Image (spheres, rainbow, N blue to C red):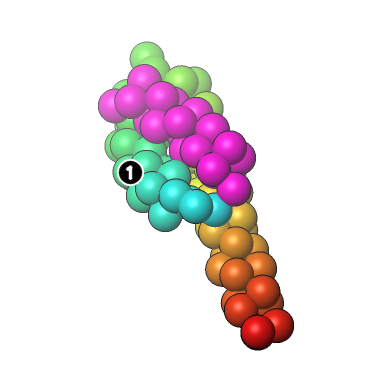
Amino acid sequence: MAVASLVLGIISIIIGAVSGGLVGWLGAILAIIGIVLGAIGRKNPEHKGIATGGLVCSIIGLILSLILYIACIGCTAGLASLY
């Protein structure tokens, strides 16, 4: 659970930063799954550090994905209002 949370968190950060909002919803979904897995993984004392890292990466990925997705929608709406 802990390693999966870390992997999903890293992937969600990469998707959120690189896509620029085009597929930001995918990064947000992966981040939410990573948050759930990180919270479950923190119950195991052997993998608590990795699970915490996965939880933090997933939260950062969720925030980044949602902010850039909302910004992309705002830019599209702003450009559409010019015509």
Asked whether residue 2 is in view, the answer is no
Residue stretch rendered in magenta on the structure: 1-20
- Judge by depth and name the residue closer to the eye, 9 or 17: 17
Whether residue 42 is situated above or below residue 70 in the rendered picture: above
* Residue at the image point whose x is 67% and y is 74% from the top: 79
- Judge by depth and name the residue closer to the eye, 32 or 51: 32
Image coords of residue 56 (percent x, y) = 55, 37
Whether residue 26 is situated above or below residue 54 in the rendered picture: below
Q: Quadrant of residue 76?
A: bottom right
Asked if residue 43 lies left or right of residue 81, the reply is left
Hey, which residue is sitting farthest front in the picture? 83
Instruction: Return the residue at label 1.
Output: 33
Q: Main secondary structure of the magenta part?
A: helix
| Quadrant of the image containing the C terminus | bottom right
- Judge whether residue 2 is colored magenta: yes
Q: Mark 1 is on which residue type? A: Ile
Asked if residue 27 lies left or right of residue 76, the reply is left
| Quadrant of the image containing the N terminus | top left
- Judge whether residue 45 is colored magenta: no
* Residue at the image point whose x is 50% and y is 38% from the top: 15
For the residue labelled by badge 1, is the local secondary structure a helix, a strand or a loop?
helix
Q: Quadrant of residue 69?
A: bottom right
Whether residue 30 is situated above or below residue 48 in the rendered picture: below
* Residue at the image point whose x is 44% and y is 49% from the top: 23
